[in-house]
Amino acid sequence: MDVLINLSYLLASAMFIIALKRLQSPRTARSGNALGAVGMLLGIIVTLLHRDVVRYEWILLGIVLGSLIGAVMALWVRMTAMPQMVALLNGFGGAASALVAIAEMERLALHHGIAAAPGVLVGTILSSVVIGAVTFTGSVIAFGKLQELISGRPLILPFHHGWNALQAAAIVVLSVLIVLQQQTWSESLLLQLFGVVTAISALLGILLVLPIGGADMPVVISFLNSLSGLAAASTGFVLHNYLLIIAGTLVGASGFILTNIMCVAMNRSLLNVLFGGFGAEVASGVATDRVVRSTTAEDAAVILGYARSVVIVPGYGMAVAQAQHAVKKLATLLQQRGVDVKFAIHPVAGRMPGHMNVLLAEADVPYDLLYEMERINPEFEHTDVALVVGANDVVNPAARKDPTSPLYGMPILDVDRARTVIVLKRSMNPGFAGVENELFYQPNTYMLFGDARQSLEAISEALKSV
């Protein structure tokens, strides 16, 4: 039976690796996701065949409840709320790892004695509970910010980073003491210290994410996803489960790679994201000494209708307005008039990696119309109209021109180089970074204020009579 289980784990691991490969492209992402799910199902089934599993009542109850909750979330949660759900799922992964580690420590105390356990095992249990607790509470705060239950602006308490450093030091010191003194200190004291480590880790997760602003949420979600994988891998070492080790390592590594990609896209380091408090100071709204050119849906329809090429730039405003279907409708109308339509996707547009891709896929926008930043930027100089739908910081020319700007050096979509720019936005308020957007004041930019979906529908209706 052990041979069968290990071979099944090997097959499931191979499926995970292939699934990750297929997730790299929108064309193969669905089949990759399905393959990963089948691999996970295989892993669960063969794990239940292990000789150490003697009762199934609570396991089956957990499977049924978890499946029902997952199905409800998948069916009811809107695509615009996908970042919140991903953050919550990261938290569930961390919580599961922490709970398994806590249960294993209790089992050692009740049946074998902590003193008799190898120091490596105790240390692994501690690492699992620390990473899992930080991931869980950090993900809950990220969920709260994304769901707007908590302010999306950075919340920095007095001596904030100093407290974080003290907590991290306390976790390390207490963990080392538990491992070194496990054979000399009483089990009750060891368990109490273990509880203290767990509590401090949970508090650390909260304080780590509170000072992070909404503009950095894509990086935070990737980072927490990586931590959830590391927590699962640690739990795999605790339980001697090869599939958990492999799957957790894959998630941890891929999450960290994605985190690095997000940081490069923002021209900032991970440390700056976690400790920079980016966006805490919000710039004032409108600069009164500069000219803003507003337009109407009818005028925008004329400009778009007689263009030869249009690049649509979606941002978080499109997600908030749930305007992805209206965007698709307008793109179709323009294509029917012979206009060359493309979509420009910035790596950190929205609230999670791939947020815009997910929304546009829901609206059945063809994959071959989606262009990544590196591919589309050289084309803006030859583009008649750039239509910005709710994007802000990722199209701010200050990132390229103003060395004093907090955005300076961040790679952006070069929409300002198009012949005409139309920006759909509710107001002149700055984006999550709190930086005034130079694009709004350029002589070739026209602002169409209002809800993005309503504006797009109005443009589409007006386009029919152009």
Image (cartoon, rainbow, N blue to C red):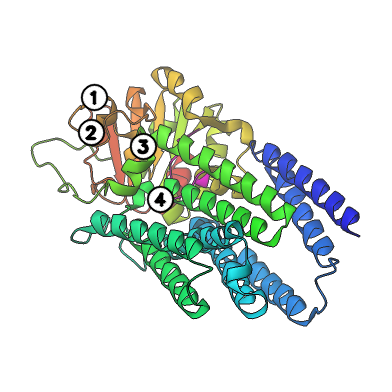
The answer to if 354 sits in the magenta stretch is yes
For marks 1 and 4, give the one nearer the viewer. Answer: 4
Per the image, the residue denoted by label 1 is 401
The amino acid on which the numbered mark 3 sits, given as a three-letter code, is Ser
Q: Name the residue under label 2.
A: 438
Camera sees residue 145: no
Residue pictured at 17% horizontal, 48% vertical = 285
First in sequence, mark 3 or 1: give its number.
Answer: 3
Question: Is the C-beta separation of discs 1 and 4 under 8 Å?
Answer: no
The residues bearing labels 3 and 2 have C-alpha atoms spaced at a distance of 24 Å
Q: Give the labeled residue for mark 4.
A: 217
Using a 10 Å C-alpha cutoff, classify the residue at mark 3 as few (fewer than 14 neighbours), some (14 to 19) or many (20 or more): some
Q: Position of residue 104 (x, y in %)?
A: 62, 70
- Residue 157 is a magenta residue: no
The reply to whether dot 2 and dot 1 touch (C-beta < 8 Å) is yes
**Mark 2 crowdedness (10 Å alpha carbons): few <14, some 14-19, many ≥20:** some
Vertical order, 76 against 445 (above or below): below
Q: Which residue is drawn at 30% across and 63% down?
A: 151
Q: Which amino acid does label 1 sit on?
A: Lys
**Mark 1: secondary structure:** helix
Q: Residue at x 26, y 30 (%)?
A: 408
The crowding category of the residue bearing disc 1, from other C-alpha atoms within 10 Å (few below 14, some 14 to 19, many at least 20), is few
- Above or below for 211 versus 329: below
Q: Residue 120 versus residue 353: which sits nearer the camera?
A: 120
Nearest the eye: 14 or 331: 14
Indicate the quadrant containing the C terminus: top left, top right, bottom left or bottom right.
Answer: top left
Sooner in the amino-acid sequence: mark 4 or mark 2: 4
- Amino acid type, label 2: Glu
- Secondary structure mostly seen in the magenta stretch: loop
Q: Mark 3 points at which residue?
A: 269
* Residues rendered magenta in the picture: 344-355
